[in-house]
Amino acid sequence: MFKALEGGPRPDPWPGDRIFVAVLGGLMGLTPLSVDMYLPALPAIGREFAASQHEVQLTLGVFFAGFGVGQLVWGPIGDRFGRRWPAVAGLLIFAAGSIAAALAPSNDFLIAARFVQAMGACVTPVMVRAMVRDVFDRERAGVMMSMMMLVMGAAPMLAPMIGGVIELWLGWRAIFVVLVIATLIVLSVLFKIPETHGEGKRRSAHWRSILAAYTELAFNRRFLSYAFGGAFFFGAMFAYIAGTPFVYIEIFGVPPQYYGFLFGLNVIAMMMSSTLNGRFMPRFGLDRTLRFGHTFAVFVGLAILAVGITGFGGLAGLVVTIFLYMFTMGAIGANSMAGAMSPFPHIAGAASALAGALQFAVGALTSVLVGLFDNGTALPMCAVMAGCSFLAFLSNRLAPRA
């Protein structure tokens, strides 16, 4: 398989080499580590820097914004220079940002360090998604992305638990030291797979070529439907990521070291749905599976809003409804990205970058909104999640049918 990837013709859509999938999943795992590991420490960071919830959540919002902007840069670079060496450069930038975050003397400095982290961390999902498109066709790409979610599922499940323990025993700064170590491991893993974007497929990195690629995507209705459907879905997820450390720890009194267990429940939901998507999507088709996922998610979003307004079920009510929302990840997350990228094999890097940038742009906005409208209850988080689920559903319904 690896020999076939090095500039030669694309292999069979199902090469059968699970090592390739495992390595790509490991590369993708750096993103949840960089977001989820320090979530239990957000209240502690606020106390050390005497910062409000909104100010501390800016470390998340700025990370999401940098992650989105950075993808727009790295996507065309990957189309021009291949997938591997841009990934190496991005990982080194991420390591530098992690060191700066560990040494941050203030919340403002931490915000800046998180932006640098994001500009480097965003390279791995862009290149991994492009690698999948380099090798697999449309339907198989959806299956492969679901498999990668299974492989990388351990990262967001374990990261908050590990982060809570590290914060308890060593302080929150040690979390970023661990991220530097994880980056070095990812760098070593990166060289286990071949270059999937050979010299003969590469495009010019001139600004006119980059502008032409993004213009083609920006005026393609099918791409926009898939991309915005996925972006709004992830916007709700980022609202949950930004809101639950304060809702669970500050409002419901969950100890930081136990926050990871509640977070891990939702990762289990994501892994279960990814397994089901890999099994049933080839049978029912990408678009039909995606429509079902968005329909289910919008009803769950309404349930989350009802819990936020009435307080019904308390902490358990929130945990159950958010679990159900995350259960739609397999049907929506992987299939939205596969659908957005499938018509554009000639600019797979740019398509991956723009779709990913939209996800994190919406995520940056929703995480800021949750902190901005904080009123000491779970309602702002729940309202943002419900609104995003409706907009994702609407984007899907406006899609041109194949």
Image (cartoon, grey):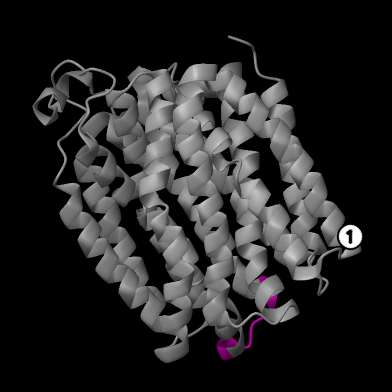
Q: Quadrant of the N terminus?
A: top left
Whether residue 51 is in magenta: the answer is yes
Q: Is residue 172 visible?
A: no
Indicate left or right for 255 with 253 as reference.
Answer: left
Q: Quadrant of the C terminus?
A: top right
Asked which secondary structure carries label 1, the reply is: helix
The correct choice, above or below, for 342 with respect to 307 in the image is above
Q: Circle 1 is placed at which residue position?
A: 309
Q: Which residues are magenta?
A: 48-54
Q: Residue at x 36, y 67 (%)?
A: 97
Give the image quarter of residue 293.
Answer: top right
Residue 133: horizontal and vertical position, in percent?
A: 34, 26
| Residue at the far top in the pictured view | 402
Whether residue 119 is in magenta: the answer is no
For label 1, the crowd category at 10 Å Cα-Cα, with few meaning under 14, some 14 to 19 and many 20 or more, is some
Indicate left or right for 125 with 90 as reference.
Answer: right
| Residue at the far left in the pictured view | 3
In depth, the one of 197 and 17 nearer the eye is 17
Indicate left or right for 39 with 387 as reference.
Answer: left
Residue 347: horizontal and vertical position, in percent?
A: 37, 23
Q: Is residue 358 visible?
A: yes
Image label count: 1
The correct choice, above or below, for 29 with respect to 359 in the image is below
Residue 244: horizontal and vertical position, in percent?
A: 65, 67
Q: Residue at x 37, y 74 (%)?
A: 176
Residue 45: horizontal and vertical position, in percent?
A: 55, 82
Q: Residue at x 54, y 30 (%)?
A: 336
- Residue type indicated by callout 1: Ile
The correct choice, above or below, for 303 with respect to 316 in the image is above
